[in-house]
Amino acid sequence: MHRIDVATAVAVKPTYPAGGTPGYFANCNPGEGFPGTIMDAHWLNRVQEEISNVILAAGLTLDAADDTQLLQALSELIPDPEEAASGRLLNVVNITASGTYTKNVAAHNVLVYVLGGGGGAGGGAGGASASGVGGPGAGGGAAVKRLLNSALATNTTVTIGAGGNGGADGTANGSNGGTTSFGAHVSATGGKGGPYRSGSQGMTMPSNYDCSGGDGTGGDINWKGDSPVIPPGFWGPTIISGTGARGAGPIGGPGARPGVNPSLPSNGFDADANTGGGGSPGITVYQSGNCAGGNGGSGRVVVFEFA
């Protein structure tokens, strides 16, 4: 498209006169004495400028050798129908077990949340004159990442981190929670397991006790799982252990409720599945017996699919 550039063209656009009565073009009709509609420079300038302004608004430079510029400009200025409808939530996929995510071909982008598994709690062992209360498990980490659907394979491998196992008795630590991943795009590690306590150790945690929560990796936002409260409980008429730590982020859930030891050795409690929460520990207070710690909650993946 190019503005007229013949020798008789003027450099400054003439001022438009007031508009007359709107009408239409007609051919000449000698039989009726009608000379036909006369092409007016003002009307031609209006048409030229209407087209030129669309092209210029699209950021293009008028080019006499390119007669596709109006089409290019319209394509730039008017979004594709699918693009115009972008942002609408199509579906939510909640993945609670390892497997495969198959992308929705109608989606334009996805928001993927991942949550690691919670740590298992330590066991407790005591005796007639000794006590042991294990350490709670830490919460799994979490992350969220926005991905264009075009960046996804048809099928993406999803791994759900298992909750850590609770210490089997008063001489076993809880194990760490597993890592949850969505292909190679984004992942979250599990929370640390709690230590066992036995003999006269009571609720005192070892100096090298790593009670850190898991971490999100590769996300647009990454969250760290909660660490359990240290010391993990209190003495009193009723002995209560520490609570399992919470899984991270908006899809994380609470850890296991605390164990209670009014008169008998007590095993810890398991965190609910797919919460990323830590387990609560076993308790023995001046009693013989070995008590297991509770298991951590497994992780999960949630995929929000948008048009």
Image (spheres, rainbow, N blue to C red):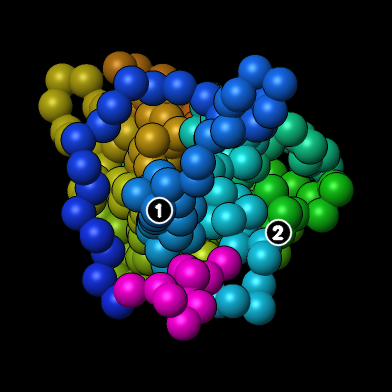
Q: Mark 1 falls on what kind of element?
A: helix
Q: Main secondary structure of the magenta part?
A: loop
Give whichever of 88, 58 is nearer the camera. Answer: 58
Which residue is found at the position 30% from the left and 77% from the top? 11
Find disc 2 in the rendering and name its residue: 151
Which residue is found at the position 22% from the left and 20% from the top? 238
Which residue is found at the position 21% from the left and 42% from the top? 17
How many numbered dots are placed on residues in this image? 2
Give the residue type that dot 2 points to.
Ala
Residue 190 is situated, as x and y percent measured from the top left of the image, at 53, 54
Q: Mark 2 falls on what kind of element?
A: helix
Above/below status of 280 relative to 113: above
Magenta residues, start to end: 1-10
> Does residue 168 show up?
no
> Does residue 56 show up?
yes
Q: Nearer the viewer, mark 1 or mark 2?
A: 1
Above/below status of 190 relative to 95: below
Mark 1 and mark 2: span between their CA atoms? 53 Å
Find disc 1 in the rendering and name its residue: 41
Give whichever of 57, 38 is nearer the camera. Answer: 38
Answer left or right for 224 relative to 112: left
Residue 54 is situated, as x and y percent measured from the top left of the image, at 44, 53
Give whichever of 249, 238 is nearer the camera. Answer: 249
Give the residue type that dot 1 points to.
Ala
Crowding near the residue tagged with mark 1, few <14, some 14–19, many ≥20 C-alpha atoms within 10 Å: few
Residue 29 is situated, as x and y percent measured from the top left of the image, at 68, 26
Which residue is found at the position 74% from the left and 32% from the top? 106
Give whichever of 177, 180 is nearer the camera. Answer: 180
- The answer to whether marks 1 and 2 mark residues whose Cβ atoms lie closer than 8 Å is no
